Image: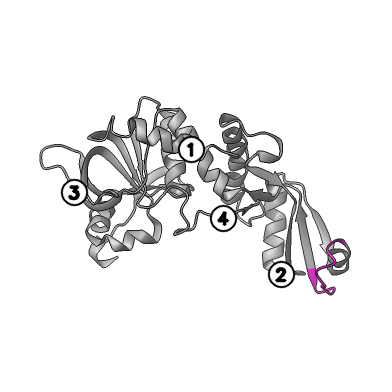
Amino acid sequence: MLATKYIARNYRNISRRWIKTLDVAVVGGGIMGSSSAYHLMKGKRDFKVGLFEQFELGHIFGSSHGDARLIRPTYPDETYVGMCMISFEGWDELSDEVGLKGDDKLQHMTGGLEIGTKGSDAVRLLEETLIKMGLQFSIMDGGDISKSFPQFSFDSDFIGIYCEKSGVLRADDCLKAYNKATTMMGGLLFPHHTLKSLSKHPDSDTFLLEFEIKSGEIERVESKEVVLTAGPWTSSQKPVTFLLIKYLCRWDLRTSRYISACSCDPRGC
């Protein structure tokens, strides 16, 4: 299993080294924020990246904890199938980076079964997409499903699409692996840092952030960029949300370019 003590010790020893000035501050230490910090460090290791989490790392107050998550390429959309195929490689690469082997690796292929109504548009579109993307799968009628999976009972009106390239991710371990790999590359982790304010620097093109730490004191951070991955916790910081919507953009998968995150007045979104 991953060494969570390594992460805590790393935080105590070096967390103040870059605290005043960062290239990127990632706010929210769930799976999206941890992934963002990891890829920022991996893409440019001389970046000064800090990952800020209001609770303990790996807490249960969001949507990133738990034993397992499903990973599957059986989507009726080529974009999502392609993303999933890339992620298969990424999870294996991350496992290798943090020294996980065999049954301890982050993802495990178990096979996956999609069930739908025979002749439906949804089933037809899924078949067409998997064929186009070169994925192997098998078709099962209702009787075949019941024989292979006796916990289910389906009649001839149903059809199953079974794909071996499906499985589960060890959710908790994925989060720990991202954090460990980030610190191995020089990134910084800041648990128990609650974002209290965010503003533009009056004299430079940077952001000013204020965090309340566990002792109740306020720590101030200056960062060139901010990545907000706070999920539903974002709604508790309305002034922060208003500011970020004005500056954020998102990567559009279909056009492969950045577009504005919101084209209307942020106060009305």
Select label 4 or label 1 by which is in front. 1
Percent across and percent down for residue 141 are 84, 65
Quarter placement of the C terminus: bottom left
Quarter placement of the N terminus: top right
Percent across and percent down for residue 168 are 66, 50
Asked whether the viewer can see residue 256, the reply is no
Label ID, residue 5 = 1
Label ID, residue 66 = 4
State the residue in front, 129 or 116.
116
State the residue in front, 226 or 264.
226
Q: Amino acid at mark 3?
A: Ser
Tell me, yes or no, whether the two marked residues, 4 and 3, touch with CB atoms within 8 Å: no
Q: Amino acid at mark 1?
A: Lys
- Distance, label 4 to label 3, CA atoms, is 34 Å
Select label 3 or label 1 by which is in front. 1
Q: Please tell me which of labels 2 and 4 falls first in the chain.
A: 4
Tell me, yes or no, whether the two marked residues, 3 and 1, touch with CB atoms within 8 Å: no
